[in-house]
Image (cartoon, rainbow, N blue to C red):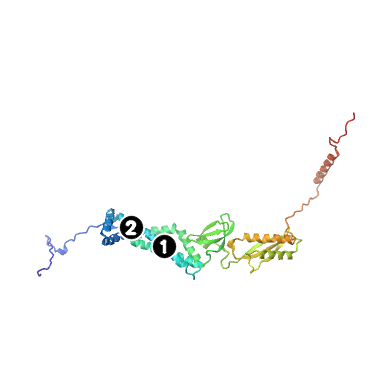
Amino acid sequence: MQAGEQVILQPVPSDGSSPATAAAPTPEASPTDSVKAADELREAVGEQSQTVGSVLDQMDSMAINIGSTHISVLDGVVFLAVVAGVFAFAFFGSRLAHAALARATRLDQTRRLLAEKIVTIVVWGMAFFIGIDLLGIDLTALAVFSGAFGLAIGFGLQKTFGNLIAGIILLMDKSIKPGDVIAIADQAGVSTFGQIRKIGIRAVSITTRDQKEYLIPNENLMINQVENWSYSSRNVRMQVPVGISYHADIDQAEELMLEAALSCGRVLKSPPPTVWLDGYGDSSVNFIIHVWITDPEAGTGNVKSEVLKKLWHLFQEHEVEIPFPQRDINLRSAEGLDQLIAALEQKRSGTKAKPSAKEKPAAKE
């Protein structure tokens, strides 16, 4: 030892044991902050501004201790701020990602929609884990609840996740996509068609011509039969039935039918309209006009109406008769029927032979 050196003096236990073997004092457990970001914020602001740091210390002092957890007013404020920030980050991040994908002209509508869904899931996942890290939540503490949470997903959210996966599969194989026209059936079993407006996480939105919007789960469209009018081609063939009289010239009638079909603006010139003789009916010779259109979402009934209206004027101009059902009644002879007719005729003749009161001659005076 030399002068100026520091030494540490330790008391020697009375039982003669060495200081190394003496029992070390056990530190008392102090409450820990429940929000990691609150503690870091208080320390960082306290180094920059003593006034603001004292305010944060006051907010942190107003707290309750539950076991080893320290919950203060500052923790609550920071928790709400972190949650709001995470939601804002996820919302605006997904919007910016959608805008960036919209400018990617190399991607078609289906691929862009699929990419937007994947990006949205990734952004919200990142925001969730960032929020967990800022709040200082230990994910290992949730291991106890992982089994119950997985069981809840398996039973309660089974359809939700099934529809999510089904929607992604539908977008990947392009079996249906926004803008397609598909045939659907309502609850009464009446079949109608509609255009796909949106493929969401849970359901597909389909709008019909009468502006009724159907929300069909993605899983139903994947496992059930779907009649897609615009899957590989947007050309759709329509049938317009027409009947003419047996006395009409069928060759002239066919020419007039083709003329009426070609006069419609929505009917395609290629492939051209065709007229087929369908059969001989009870009152008419039945034809079917086949026309092609490329915009079924604009309706099919209006095309049929326009063709029939034009054909009506052409038939009137060229004197082609459009027949209506006619029925002939044949009465068979029977003894009872003959007696009834004879009685009616006798009664009728007797009524005519009997003079009326005005026709009686005046009495002689």
Quarter containing the C terminus: top right
Residue at the image point whose x is 36% and y is 63% from the top: 130
Work out whether residue 121 or residue 341 is closer to the camera in this orientation and state it: 121
Residue at the image point whose x is 69% and y is 65% from the top: 259
Amino acid type at circle 2 is: Val
Q: Mark 2 points at which residue?
A: 78
Within the image, what quadrant is residue 278 found in? bottom right
Within the image, what quadrant is residue 232 found in? bottom right
Quarter containing the N terminus: bottom left
- Left or right position of 72 against 104: left
Q: Position of residue 123 (x, y in %)?
A: 41, 64
- Left or right position of 182 against 335: left
Q: Say how many tags the image has.
A: 2
Q: Where is residue 327 in the image (x, y as percent from the top left)?
A: 75, 54
Q: Would residue 280 be seen by someone viewing this image from the given angle?
A: no
Label 1 residue SS: helix
Up the image or down, 351 lies above or below 300; here it is above
Within the image, what quadrant is residue 192 found in? bottom right
Residue located farthest toward the right when viewing the structure as drawn: 364
Residue at mark 2 to residue at mark 1: CA–CA distance: 21 Å
Q: Position of residue 287 (x, y in %)?
A: 70, 62
Mark 2: give few (<14), some (14-19) or many (20+) Cα within 10 Å. Answer: some
Q: Mark 1 points at which residue?
A: 92
Mark 1: give few (<14), some (14-19) or many (20+) Cα within 10 Å. Answer: few
Amino acid type at circle 1 is: Phe
Residue at the image point whose x is 54% and y is 59% from the top: 206
Label 2 residue SS: helix
Q: Position of residue 175 (x, y in %)?
A: 53, 66
- Give the number of the mark in front: 2 or 1: 1
